[in-house]
Image (spheres, helix red, strand yellow):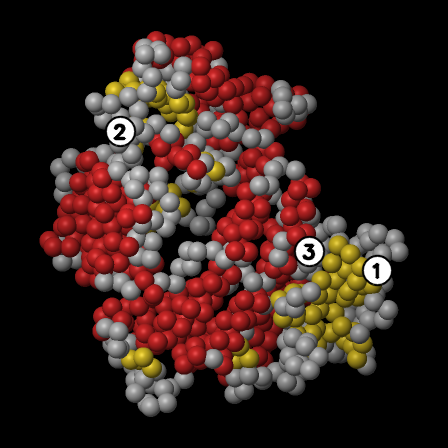
Amino acid sequence: MVSVDSKLKSIQTSIKEELEEKYPTSKFAHAFISNNLDTLDDIVRPKGVISNALAHTNKKVVISIDLKDFFPTISFPRVLGMFKQQPYFFSNKQASILASLVCLPKGVDANRGLPQGAPSSPLISNLICNKIDKQLGQLAKKLDCIYTRYADDITFSTNNINRVKPSALVNEIRKHVVRNGFEVNEEKTKIMFSNQRQMVTGIVVNDGLNLHKRHVDALRATLYNLEFKYKTTSQGIKAFWKLGSLRSFDSLVPVGFIKGETPIRFVKSASKEDGKKRLIKTTGKYQVKTYALHILGRILWYGQVVTTAISDPYSLSKNSYISPKQERRIKKFEEMLAAYYRIADKLNWPVKHIILRLANKYPHLQSLIHFDPRYTLKNIALLVAESDLITKVNKLGKDNQEYLDFYKESPETFQRHLLLRSRFKQSFKIHDIRTLAENGWVDPKLQNELFEELNTRKLADLFHKSDDGKGHKVEEILLELVKVVAPKLRYLSSNVRTKVLQVHKEFVGLIGAEGKDVKLDLEIETDLTKSAIQAIRDLKNATRLYEHNNDTFYSRIVLPSINDSDTTKLVDINTSGMAPRLITEIGAWKKALTKVLQSIKESASKVNLDSKQKPFKIKFKDANPVTGEPVTLEIFKVGHDNPFGKNLNLPENSSSGFIQKNLLGRDLTNAIEQFLPVGDIYVQGNFKDVDNAKINLTRHKFERIEEMSKDNKESLFFVLKEYQSK
């Protein structure tokens, strides 16, 4: 493993992204594939260890071959030659520069192989292996076999053992391996028949997918001991360290923790850029949480293996093709989750909410932990429009014109995020498109709908006393929260989503501890309700502004932004109207305004300004229900009209359109990103090549205006405006 300099790592990441976007890897490769999906059995799943193993289930013979010294064997001359050939056709100079950036220097490795740990190495190895993959794929087809490759692990399998003898097939594979510049690791070559345990990349493939029995037994034993034997988490960790012989399947303590009374582990120092890890002390609380998540990760890995060949969400009663063995494995997995839930409750691990979210997916688990599926907040079933969008994404090829056409037809709120990811150039990457479509994006319109529910409708009970003074029934609010939030969850900002999920988690916990009739009185805090009330306060503090002095737009947003940006001497404040009753994402306003003011401060230092008065002024406009104008914050230039020092390069005689160049520095780019949950940021003024231009920086669109807005000696400069659809 080689430590990569941070600047070189950034360059290697850029090379990886460009190559990944333009040049495909073979369909036989299953390792290091970030964009491709596997569709074996008509079920779409990401490529990886599991998809690689799944291809070889229920076969009469499985052959596993390991390539010796895989990355070191892929040397500078091989990478250089690859870049000069089809389909790359780089010049000798270009290929040499690229190969030098992704291969080790002579001073480190005489062969100049690929560095393990570099972000570019996995993809380069796959591209190098395209040739051998094609050859072995043709061989497999000819001999009625299945072929896959996971990095340096080559696997063949077949049910037609009369077609070719396994030993003869190994010899044929070896010839292709040597011919392509690799070497077979003879010690790791295995021929496995159906009466033996057949292992492919660590997964048993004899009858469906499973983990080795010793791994499963070790995990179940750990869960049993934590539930019935140990009284604290530290007892479980110390018991592990007392084992006389530590084996891989016994490794139920996170990698990096060091044996001892004081929790110590290896971590990468944030202040160092050499990539080396150092020993640091950690808190007991940190160790407990890390240990809890590590155990959960082991359980979920087992579940991912045993459930991978069936649809999601699934019902065992409706899947007749699931074998009895596989059904038993799935139920065993659900029983592990239930045991983990009981352990988390016993040892006070802060992870019970994760199991509760999983319960909607696993019906048997619901009965094991007595969970009402109506409480789940995870919206598994996508809306029709969402499914249609993902379907369109999956049909996209590699042509940027296709991406541009898709962008123009996509939802407006989707476009805002995609533009930001592409650095405001209409040249998009399929990875960015797919990530947004599958995971969701911040939609200010839907987030405002949630705010309206919190402000004036049933969910407003979260913030108010009950009419009878006895408290609100927790289950009623919880069910309303699920009903309102579930369809919107993937469109909320990370800050709002975190606050809402915390309220949901606490409410589910209250019902689990006290039953469905439990009530919550916001003014009477008990040990049982303390966490739930704090979660409500955190949500309220993040979203609601009032008329009183300590909770206004002025005191919570404008004044802190001026202080944080150190622009007190530059910016004056017109406080008129800055105390509205408003529900919005306060943090987004504050962070965005701070970055805008920092940008103004930087540009102001480059020009001569009248020191007798503050050169900028902030004004607030509340929403106007008559005109439909949303909440707006305006920043004016006062007593000067210094032009922007940039060219817009607009098409001649055009009154509006898209700006083809990126106008933004780091501060304004960050401001736009922070403000996406709320709305758009505008700027207007004179540029080097254009006078009287109004620019929507968020959507990177321009509009020529007849005369810029002025108030006395003030000219409008920046505008932060809540979202308005076209």
In this rendering, position of residue 444 left or right of residue 653: left
Q: CA distance from mark 3 to mark 2?
A: 57 Å
Vertical relation: 598 (above or below) 455: above
Q: Left or right? Give the position of 173 relative to 610.
A: left
Q: Earlier in the sequence, mark 2 or mark 1?
A: 2
Residue 354's image quarter? bottom left
Residue under pointer 3: 664
Q: Position of residue 35 (x, y in %)?
A: 51, 39
Residue identifier under label 2: 206
| Residue to which mark 1 is pinned | 655
Please provide percent x and percent y for residue 483: 42, 68
For label 2, the SS is loop
The answer for how far apart the CA atoms under marks 2 and 1 are is 68 Å
Of 509 and 105, nearer the camera is 509
Residue 584 image position (x, y, % from top left): 54, 73
Residue 714 visible within the image: yes
- Identify the residue at image location x=72%, y=54%: 663
Q: Is residue 175 left or right of residue 396?
A: left
Whichever of labels 3 and 2 marks the residue nearer the N terminus, that label is: 2
| Element assignment for label 1 | loop
Quadrant of the snapshot with the N terminus: top left
**Looking at the picture, which amino acid does disc 3 mark?**
Leu
Residue depicted at x 65% and y 81%: 625
Residue furthest left as drawn: 229
Question: From what the image shows, is residue 134 above or below residue 530?
Answer: above
Residue type, label 1? Ser
